[in-house]
Image (cartoon, helix red, strand yellow):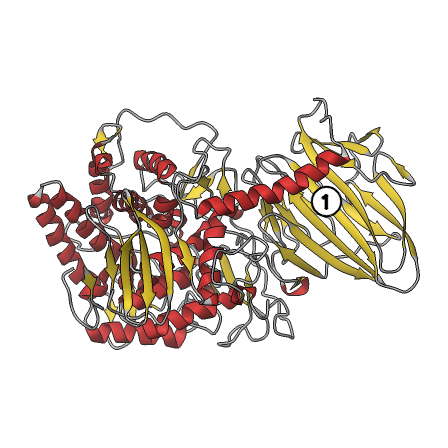
């Protein structure tokens, strides 16, 4: 079926846990740093121009980045844990099993809940890194000390609690260099229960975290190792290098340390770390692989920008994959939060990709999601053991929103995506406690009725700022975004009821959806292209925010009058889209000056917002604006993968061509699964993949050229696999098997 562009031609169509509270709510915001120059961290000419095929992890690593322009230093992940590099040359913040993020002070020096990290001096002086690189499997820092080039590389042993260091000294001068190197186990801390174990090994106890951490040195110091320092006298001839290798591992207090930590073991684990990362990366796109239960489609294109965006988006999910939770293919939202924290909202933004890549564990996770009261919290926390399933599902009556307003939509969308991608119709009849999956989906689609303050209201009241965007005090109560999502949920559920032979329920859902659509339209501000929120006191407040555009454009595109489509796009193009990124909130919004958080305010955007904005632009028929903007966002991902937010910074932060970086202030995390939304947009918008519960997939606007050429291969739909072609005449679908 070919879907016409809707604006060109109509067609039928308990405790509140917030992101902020997990980031130590209440900490004061830091003033944005003013820097006199443009960012020096740009990657320049992309290495993605070299080949159209599958990129390696080396290719997906960054170029050298100027540390002075960064708010976040490189991270390390090993499918169990996260570590964060400090701005010096050897410090690594690491707290296995715990919450890493501690305080928003920074940039580059946030306070982490960490085991005390080591420090290094060269001739009794410490140095900060001047440049760094990020790779999925390692982090690299560098500084110039006179004629010495000092490069430190760190890796986390796969699925272990071992941090490895290689510190390399290269003499770029014309004479030999001799210098003292000292490594301190915990600079700035008074030694506590620290002991010298044997040649090259120091053990210390962290009373705060009830862990012992052991440093083991393989290149034994020429001077000495004692309870606090490891010291070397290093001599390096011109144009030659010397290297110091060491590691730190974690052990329970009072338990014996590890044996067999030889130089050969170190080298084996060093190589294994990269090899295992590469194996899992290759498995991600391989049908019938031995790691995931599905696969992500393979993108083949000469379009360097879209290729990089897609693969970095998928890599974001691999970075945040955890295999040590009860569901051993869990995509945690960010690594710095308490172990196992998953936000429903962020996860739903890559729901199609999730269903393609890991349908088996997605199904198990959805069962857990459907057991929850969606109005209770913002998150679900995965443990090593699955919590027992309830026998009965009971939820409070009346208005009861204690978590995110997005949860009904998010859990519904995840369930719907699993169903239409896998075509697992039997899942609808599976029991979730005393209800079926279909009944639970009906609860989610109709939960808006509980959120009416008056039974005659036609719009749901989605609560206060903490239930919505957290940092925008005026974006509250009856908002167009989630009410438009209700229209979509009811219509999609009606299709499922039709499929199951319940025409009466399907008709009622469609009638309710049509009534709600008309109510949503009363919130539109004519000729302005923006929407209003209706507060409980009757105040109508004009909102100039991307989320209304993205949700209304995504869910109601086929219903909107052409003039409304045009006005909405004009607003986004005029006030939100910048040269390399976008503003979540217009600088002209009435609350802009008091909403400055990088993810939802006027000085940046949550990393998923550009992707969903592109999706809405395309569904409204404005491909000529959407695709070039999508390409431009390639310039913003030079620091690695997708984050919680990117911010505009420096003296030009209010300008259209402002420099962009990963944000850290106000508790923004270095990586976030919301970045999977970019791959979702490539799959479902650029390539138009529209899965449905029966038959072959539809294609969105198949006869509309995207201005983008490429192929999406090994796209699973039910038991079949397809290739989608995008070319000068639009899209084509070809079955592979």
Residue that extends furthest to the front in the rendered view of this protein:
737
Q: Position of residue 633 (x, y in %)?
A: 47, 67
Q: Is residue 6 depicted above or below 671 in this figure? A: below
Q: Is residue 267 depicted above or below 677 in this figure? A: above
Residue at 68% across, 37% down: 268
Question: Circle 1 is placed at which residue position?
Answer: 165
Q: Quadrant of residue 684?
A: bottom left
Q: Is residue 672 in sight in this rendering?
A: no
Q: Position of residue 623 (x, y in %)?
A: 32, 71
Q: Is residue 725 in sight in this rendering?
A: yes
Q: Position of residue 220 (x, y in %)?
A: 85, 38
In the shown orientation, is residue 637 left or right of residue 209? left
In the shown orientation, is residue 571 left or right of residue 239? left
In the shown orientation, is residue 638 left or right of residue 260? left
Looking at the picture, tell me which residue is in the foreground, 484 or 15. Answer: 484
In the shown orientation, is residue 448 left or right of residue 250? left
Residue at 55% across, 60% down: 662
Q: Is residue 573 depicted above or below 464 in this figure? A: below
Residue at 51% across, 62% down: 646
Residue at 34% across, 51% down: 715
| Label 1 Cα crowd, 10 Å radius (few <14 / some 14-19 / many 20+) | many
Looking at the picture, tell me which residue is in the foreground, 335 or 165. Answer: 165
Q: Quadrant of the N terminus?
A: bottom left
Looking at the picture, tell me which residue is in the foreground, 207 or 683. Answer: 683
Mark 1 secondary-structure assignment: strand
Q: How many marks?
A: 1
Q: Position of residue 571 (x, y in %)?
A: 34, 74
Q: Quadrant of residue 617?
A: bottom left
Q: Quadrant of residue 258?
A: top right
Looking at the picture, tell me which residue is in the foreground, 462 or 68. Answer: 68
């Amino acid at each position: 079926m070919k879907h016409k562009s809707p604006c060109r031609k109509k067609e039928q169509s308990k405790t509140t846990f917030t992101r902020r509270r997990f980031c130590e709510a209440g900490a004061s915001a830091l003033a944005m740093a003013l820097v006199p120059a443009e960012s020096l961290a740009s990657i320049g000419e992309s290495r993605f121009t070299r080949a159209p095929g599958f990129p390696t992890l080396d290719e997906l690593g960054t170029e050298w980045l100027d540390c002075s322009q960064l708010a976040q230093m490189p991270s390390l992940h090993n499918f169990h844990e996260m570590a964060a590099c400090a701005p010096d040359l050897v410090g690594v913040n690491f707290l296995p099993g715990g919450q890493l993020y501690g305080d928003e002070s920074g940039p580059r020096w946030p306070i982490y809940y960490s085991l005390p990290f080591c420090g290094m001096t060269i001739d009794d002086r410490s140095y900060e890194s001047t440049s760094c690189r990020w790779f999925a499997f390692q982090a690299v820092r560098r500084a110039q000390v006179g004629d010495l080039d000092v490069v430190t590389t760190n890796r986390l042993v796969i699925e272990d609690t071992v941090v490895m260091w290689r510190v390399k000294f290269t003499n770029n001068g014309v004479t030999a260099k001799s210098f003292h190197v000292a490594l301190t186990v915990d600079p700035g801390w008074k030694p506590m229960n620290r002991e010298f174990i044997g040649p090259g090994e120091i053990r210390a106890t962290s009373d705060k975290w009830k862990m012992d951490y052991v440093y083991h040195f393989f290149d034994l110091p020429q001077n000495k190792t004692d309870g606090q320092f490891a010291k070397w006298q290093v001599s390096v001839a011109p144009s030659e290098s010397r290297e110091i290798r060491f590691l730190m591992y974690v052990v329970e207090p009072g338990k014996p340390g590890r044996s067999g930590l030889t130089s050969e073991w170190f080298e084996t684990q060093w190589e294994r770390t990269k090899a295992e990362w590469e194996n899992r990366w290759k498995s991600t796109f391989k049908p019938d692989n031995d790691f995931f239960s599905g696969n992500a489609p393979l993108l083949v294109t000469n379009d360097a920008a879209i290729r990089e965006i897609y693969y970095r988006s998928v890599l974001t999910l691999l970075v945040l994959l955890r295999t040590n939770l009860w569901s051993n293919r869990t995509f945690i939202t960010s690594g710095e939060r308490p172990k196992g924290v998953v936000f429903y909202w962020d996860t739903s933004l890559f729901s199609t990709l999730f269903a393609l890549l890991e349908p088996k564990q997605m199904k198990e996770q959805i069962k857990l999601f459907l057991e929850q009261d969606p109005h209770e919290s913002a998150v679900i926390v995965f443990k090593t053991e699955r919590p027992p399933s309830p026998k009965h599902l009971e939820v409070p009556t009346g208005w009861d929103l204690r978590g995110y307003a997005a949860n009904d939509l998010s859990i519904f969308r995840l369930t719907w995506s699993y169903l239409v991608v896998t075509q697992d119709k039997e899942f609808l009849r599976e029991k979730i406690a005393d209800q079926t999956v279909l009944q639970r989906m009906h609860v989610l689609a109709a939960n808006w009725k509980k959120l009416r303050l008056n039974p005659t209201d036609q719009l749901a009241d989605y609560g206060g700022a903490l239930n919505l965007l957290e940092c925008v005090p005026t974006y509250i109560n009856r908002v167009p975004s989630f009410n438009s999502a209700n229209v979509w949920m009811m219509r999609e559920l009606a299709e499922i009821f039709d499929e199951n032979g319940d025409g009466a329920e399907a008709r009622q859902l469609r009638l309710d959806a049509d009534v709600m659509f008309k109510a949503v339209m009363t919130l539109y501000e004519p000729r302005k292209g923006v929407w209003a929120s209706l507060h409980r006191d009757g105040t109508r407040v004009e909102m100039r925010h991307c989320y209304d555009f993205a949700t209304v454009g995504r869910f109601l595109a086929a219903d909107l009058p052409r003039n409304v489509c045009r006005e909405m796009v004009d607003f986004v193009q005029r006030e939100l889209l910048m040269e390399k990124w976008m503003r979540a909130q217009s600088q002209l919004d009435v609350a802009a000056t008091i909403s400055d958080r990088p993810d939802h305010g006027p000085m940046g955007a949550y990393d998923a917002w550009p992707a969903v904005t592109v999706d809405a632009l395309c569904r409204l028929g404005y491909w000529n604006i959407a695709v070039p903007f999508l390409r431009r966002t390639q310039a913003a991902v030079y620091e690695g993968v997708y984050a919680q937010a990117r911010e505009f910074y420096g003296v030009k932060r209010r300008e259209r061509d402002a420099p962009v970086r990963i944000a850290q202030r106000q508790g923004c995390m270095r990586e976030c699964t919301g970045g999977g939304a970019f791959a979702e947009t490539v799959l479902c918008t650029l390539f138009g993949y529209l899965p449905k519960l029966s038959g072959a997939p539809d294609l969105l606007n198949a006869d509309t050229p995207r201005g983008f050429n490429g192929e999406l291969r090994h796209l699973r739909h039910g038991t079949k696999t397809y290739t989608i072609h995008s070319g000068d005449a639009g899209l084509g679908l070809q079955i592979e098997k």
